Amino acid sequence: MRKIIVLYCLIMASVVYSQNTMSVSSPDGELILNVLVKSGQPVYSVTYKGGIVLEDSPLGLITNAGDFTANMNFVSSATAKVEENYNQTKIKQSQVSYKANALNCVFSNAKEQKIAVLFQVSNNNIAFRYEIPSWGDTKVCVVTEEKTGFSFSSSTTTFLSPMMRPMTGFARTAPSYESGYEADLPLDKATSSEGYVFPGLFHLGDKAWVLLSETGVSSLYTGSHLSKFKDGLFTVEYPNPKQNNGFGSSGAQISLPGVTPWRTITVGETLKPIVETTIPFDVVKPLYKPSQEYKTGRGSWSWIVWQDNSMNYDDQVKYIDLAAAMKFEYILIDAWWDERIGYEKMKELIQYAKSKNVEVFLWYNSNGTANDAFQTPLHKMNTTIARKNEMKWLKEAGVKGLKVDFFGGDKQETMKLYEDILSDANDYGLMIIFHGTTLPRGWEKMYPNFVGSEAVLASEMLIFSQDVREKEAYFASLHPFIRNAVGSMEFGGVLLNKFLNKGNQKGQERLTTDAFQLATAVLFQNPVQMFGLTPNNLQDVPAFELDFLKTVPTTWDETVFIDGYPGKYTVIARRNNQKWYVAGVNAEKTAKVLKLKLPMLAGQTINIYNDKVDKETYTTSVKVSKKGDLTITIQPNGGFVLTN
């Protein structure tokens, strides 16, 4: 059941008063946004609980039909109240009540062309977008540049992931949002030549935490990112023209009237509003209805540890049996299946999986023209005719979902491909996971069959890189505050082999504990989770760990920040129905003793999965005090989970 209420009250003002400040505050009055025209430039600023969060920051667009960044005048403004109650099972909170105060500011340029900026301010969150009318006979335009900026105080530190250079990396598939993060970096050190991906986290000392991102990007616009820090601020940047092998505009071609995606700002004294925000979904709408009910859940996949050589019929039978033994809903069969198993044998394999109550996801290469990725199936997803022919076969064969890989770009051309794949897949009852991909920007709500994106330095790099293995706990302690705070994150984790290869005897040694891995099953939110277990784990992993994974959910009704500092440690709680899971990891070099406040578990006897000093994982039961207090120790590179 969804209720939307928008009440507008028009407030007219003449150009004579263009220097006046227009303001809008959150319903609780603590977050205030101010807008004014300063020397012909529209700017906005943000305060929270009386402290400055963003200093005067520029607004404006440049289009091929007009410049809206200079010589601007204020025309009018309108205020509104916005309310929406909605249900969404694929994000961190299943029932959301969104209430915001809105301010729509209209400006005109020297040619007397108008443009508006719509701001919506809810408690701890700001979302804003540009609204572009038609100008006389001009019914289309190309937005070539955006001047939206974010001006922080000089003492601010950053938690950012660099945008990858285009046409670099594996088979020239970058950017794929697979860079690491640098924590607490001073502003003047944020100088990556390609800028930084959304979202970006900022710490204003003891004043506030700020998370910047964008949402609502569809086929009608380009994806954007943050610039490097220059001239005292970060700005919104459109894709590097060299993405997609130089093909396609880096700007956005839109019909008029039209709108941009939303830019979002989440603010809090603590990290609680950052972890718990739903703003990426509050301001977007579903773009089509689901063709059927889609079932989320867990899955096995052979490629992550057993790699390409496992793409054969017999090994996939072993992984189907693993999924069945673990009561997983799915198996993901990865690259090369079309060549090494074949379409006819795949039908047999799908039927075998069904006999075990396991459904199938199949991997596809998105590429046809954009990069050099060569894994097959290839040339099946990049054109409408090939895609629909393939999806017809997939539906007839009984496949339930696809993992589509190797996109490498944020241009409107690529955003259209994402949407076309999703829309066509819905027609055939298929769920979609994207890999080698961009950040999902509100897609869980916009596209009902979307069930996750990678867009993170994920589990495969634990296989390939010693440096990433050494930083696994460090990155895990960051994700709930940054990447996973704004969208589903298909990490592909929970690796319980001691060595991350098929032999499990030597080689890529896992440096985190089993309890750490169990914690990530809760810590990382994605409605369909493909776990990195291997068939030998049924014999070489303690039964209590497997029992935990047999019942751990992948969808949540509530998410609560408990404790943490990005890059050091994190503890969050998630609820599925009436059952709570509290998970934490420690990225520091020494054991960490935490005194947790857990009011949701007050007075209860709970199960705990934790590590001993020697890193051996154990389980026991403990009693939470009637006040909800519990002291727990997390070992370095370790973790814990509590359940009631």
Image (spheres, rainbow, N blue to C red):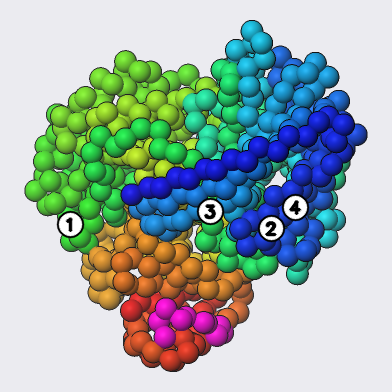
Rate crowding at label 4 as few (under 14), some (14 to 19) or many (20 or more) other CA atoms within 10 Å.
many
Residue 311 in sight in this render = no
Q: Secondary structure at mark 3?
A: strand
Rate crowding at label 3 as few (under 14), some (14 to 19) or many (20 or more) other CA atoms within 10 Å.
many
In front: label 3 or label 2: 3
Write down the region rendered in magenta.
593-602
Rate crowding at label 2 as few (under 14), some (14 to 19) or many (20 or more) other CA atoms within 10 Å.
many
Which of the two discs, 4 and 2, labels the residue nearer the N terminus? 2
Q: Amino acid at mark 4?
A: Val
Which of the two discs, 1 and 4, labels the residue nearer the N terminus? 4
Q: CA distance from mark 4 to mark 2?
A: 7 Å
Q: Residue at x 35, y 84 (%)?
A: 606
Q: Which residue is mark 1?
A: 324
Q: Which residue is mark 2?
A: 31
Q: Residue at x 60, y 31 (%)?
A: 260
Q: Position of residue 598 (x, y in %)?
A: 47, 80
Q: Position of residue 408 (x, y in %)?
A: 53, 32
Q: CA distance from mark 1 to mark 4?
A: 52 Å
In front: label 2 or label 1: 2
Q: Which residue is mark 3?
A: 99
Q: CA distance from mark 2 to mark 1?
A: 50 Å
Q: Nearer the viewer, residue 136 or 466?
A: 136
